[in-house]
Image (cartoon, helix red, strand yellow):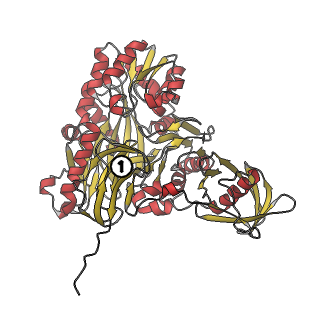
Amino acid sequence: MISSVLVANRAEIACRVFRTCRSLGIDTVAVYADPDADALHVREADAAVRLPGAAPSDTYLRGDLVVAAALAAGADAVHPGYGFLSENADFARAVLDAGLTWIGPPPDAIAAMASKTRAKELMAAAGVPLLDPVDPAKATDADLPLLLKAAAGGGGRGMRVVRDLAALPGELAAAAAEARSAFGDGEVFAEPYVERGRHVEVQVLADAHGTVWTLGTRDCSLQRRHQKVVEEAPAPGLGPALLETLRASAVAAAKAVGYTGAGTVEFLVTGDRAYFLEMNTRLQVEHPVTEAVFGLDLVAHQLRIAEGAALPPEPPAPEGHAVEVRLYAEDPARDWAPQTGVLHALDVPRGDGLRVDTGYAAGDTVGVHYDAMLAKVIAHAPTRDEAVRRLAHALARTRVHGPVTNRDLLLASLRHPDFAAGRPDTGFYDRNLPALTAPAPGEDLAAVAAALAAASGRTGRFGAFRNVPSQPLTARYGDHEVRYRHTRDGGFTVESHPHARVVAVSPARVRLDVDGVVRSFEVAAHGDGVVHVDGHRLTAHPRFTDPAARTAPGSLLAPMPGTVVRVADLAVGARVEAGQPLLWLEAMKMEHRVTAPASGTLTALHAAPGHQVEVGTLLAVVQDAPEKETDL
């Protein structure tokens, strides 16, 4: 019997495993890097062991340190979570060699599925349907578009879509470099890229006594940069024959490698056909939707299977539908740039078919070193329509104060006609992102509420300012200008929005009568120039421009904090074109291309691989080439 579990991970998944351990009477041990010293998963654990350093390669990816931590804390089992070392066969073997219980599949099963190319060979032998591979050296225009994929790892790293044959060599090199940086393995392969395909997966659970459960399907098609954003169970709109193909293929995949524990077999679905993509030999981020539909605890089953227990012959029957969204600290309108800062508030509705899994609490800081996911919000209901509506309602009432998040995008995604009709596909964000990131309705009234709350609290710096005594007070929030006056009775009138009558004002709440309908706005400011009004995040404009914000023309500033992982092979003085990649930044497990802001001459380059940069760091300067003088 397991008595103490160390979770070789952090944040949300560590907290998730701890929750089940507590319910089963099992002690918990956390590990933490220095930036996580006061993280929620550390606070929730019974004991915690420091992994000195900050970078994942020095901390959470050091299997030797994690095993030593388990032994030092007296743990008798290790749960890997997902990401980091969860699909590392050598780490699994090291855990077992140390006399500890490994809460996962056999190391040989992990190794067999670790390489996507090797896994495809095994699946072909097991009769699982596959896409035909494409040799990049022999590719023609008829093979386009192509999808380049890293043979090792996951999470969208090392993946590229190629639509132009001339771009293939450069994209191959870029994909290999990213894969080598992320996984220590630069092998890349190519296969046909299916436009508007669907990402459908099957949850499997197997014991050491020969029983293999398949727990329905999940659709994870809504992705950004090949990373999942919205997931649901069961996958909508699949016919009986296709469902049977998926089920039988998942069982064949699990049995081909002698699998035990929880795992996921992923497929590309197009029309009525399914093709094997890969097998994730671990728990998935989206496992809660399966738990909700089947009414079980997958982590509890992982623990029992690790203890040698047998599964019942058949799984429970599914009920209803579940949908999950991943709430990220990122800005979808700025190429999904990750965001950092203090999380002043994180308040997501719970109960009544709603579940929230998170590794953060109000007051925590979102840093640059790790994944940007703040929480997972899951809704379960008897039907898909009800589950989607319940989840959208919860997101609309979610308060997240601090960094920019994708909350508004998630809400707009759930309400989009294609998703509402059960037609998700992997090209969803490529087609719809501009519309989904448009300003949310009601932002102009939120700006009015922010201005009035600031004026009532006399906050000064980010409140209103008066240019001419006889003129109304003026304030700007984002793209919205608000003009208003004080009244003799201590109230306000709003001149810029004549249809809005002020009912009541305080520094924290404003009530407006808008065309006969009274609306209440909750206002919160945290001293950083950002004001949160209900679900709106507004940036207040100070009266004068900060001189420090002025930079020379052509300056290329870091759009986010991160690490420079690669720099283009260019020398100062080289000619560059607008949009040409100059360097690549890695931040929060994602790689971002930083491109030339305009065509011209590269006159300065201040970045080198390995450099840590903050937002606004000067990386390079591209200036217009001077025109040559001509003789008259």
Q: Residue furthest right?
A: 489
Give, as a three-letter code, the residue at label 1: His
Query: Which corner quadrant of the image does residue 246 belong to?
Result: top left
Identify the image quadrant of residue 207.
top left
Q: Residue at x 26, y 28 (%)?
A: 109
The residue lying toward the viewer, choosing from 142 and 246, is 142
| Closer-to-camera residue (627/242) | 627
Left or right, residue 15 beside residue 83: right
Residue lying at the far bottom of the rendered structure: 632
Which residue lies most toward the left here? 138
The x and y percentages for residue 597 are 36, 62
Left or right, 548 with respect to 57, comes to right
The residue located at (46%, 39%) in the rendering is 367
Q: Residue 197: image x %, image y %?
A: 34, 55
Query: What residue is rendered at 64% in x and 63% in y?
Result: 444
Secondary structure, mark 1, is loop
Q: Which is more toward the observer, 621 or 510?
A: 621
Asked if one can make out residue 75 in the rendered structure from this viewpoint, the answer is: no
- Residue 580 placement (x, y as % from top left): 29, 61
Q: Which residue is mark 1?
A: 226
For disc 1, the neighbor class at 10 Å (few under 14, some 14 to 19, many from 20) is some
Quadrant in which the C terminus is drawn? bottom left
